[in-house]
Amino acid sequence: MNKNQQKMVAYGRVIDNVMGRVEQLQDRMSPEFEELRAAIDNNTLADLDVKHYDDIRKDFAAGTADYGTLLKQYQTASAPARLIGNHILLTKSFAGFVDGCQAMTDSLGDNKQIDVEAFNAAEKKQDEQTELITRYLQKIQTMV
């Protein structure tokens, strides 16, 4: 394998590792998000157990920290020359996704007080950035 091929393989591993971990985090956090989303939509936040709500807040904070660690892997990855442009766009989109996660985590206040406007805006930002991440990953895959 030549040097360029080795670089491509190493870069592919970074993407696989990051996106595999993202999938694990989303699998873990999605039910909690759905629970909060339903409580907001149905105006049933008061029905949530305080300890359970606090556990969700902690999980969101830990998940957001994990996403930040994954972002650093993208930021320090060495992309092959022909993928640099899409890698930069992928990294920027992933950073936007992490910002959305942090904003959502920040919207979860003490005593089951959620800043619903901030929560909704964070959800929208995450969705938009996820679409971009998917687009750039697809572009990278077609270029490999």
Image: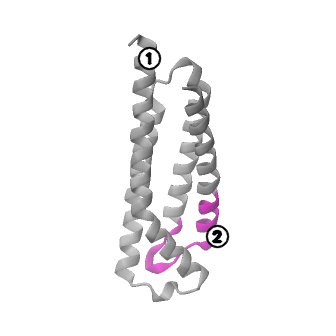
Which residue does the numbered mark 1 point to in the structure image?
Answer: 5
Q: Is residue 115 magenta?
A: yes
Question: What amino acid is labelled 2 in the image?
Answer: Glu
The dot on residue 106 is none
Query: Viewer-proximal residue, 102 or 67?
Result: 67
Image location of residue 51, percent across then percent down = 34, 79
Question: What amino acid is labelled 1 in the image?
Answer: Gln
Q: Is residue 14 above or below residue 112?
A: above
Q: Is residue 63 magenta?
A: no
Q: Is residue 36 above or below residue 99?
A: below
Disc with the residue nearer the chain's start (1 vs 2): 1
Q: Residue at x 41, y 12 (%)?
A: 3
Label 1, label 2: how many angstroms apart (C-alpha)?
A: 47 Å
Which residue extends farthest top? 2
Query: Viewer-proximal residue, 93 or 10?
Result: 10
How was the colour assigned to the protein in this rendering?
one colour
The stretch in magenta equals: 107-124
Q: Quadrant of residue 126?
A: bottom right
Quadrant in the picture for the C terminus: top right
Which residue does the numbered mark 2 point to in the structure image?
Answer: 117
Quadrant in the picture for the N terminus: top left
- The residue tagged with tag 1: helix, strand or loop? helix
Q: Is residue 117 above or below residue 139?
A: below
- Crowding around mark 2 (Cα neighbors within 10 Å: few <14, some 14 to 19, many 20+) is few
Query: Viewer-proximal residue, 139 or 89?
Result: 139
- The residue tagged with tag 2: helix, strand or loop? helix
Secondary structure mostly taken by the magenta-highlighted segment of the chain: helix
Q: Residue at x 51, y 78 (%)?
A: 113
Image location of residue 112, percent across then percent down = 47, 79
Q: Could you tell me how many numbered marks the image carries?
A: 2
Is 109 on the left or on the right of 13, as rendered?
A: right
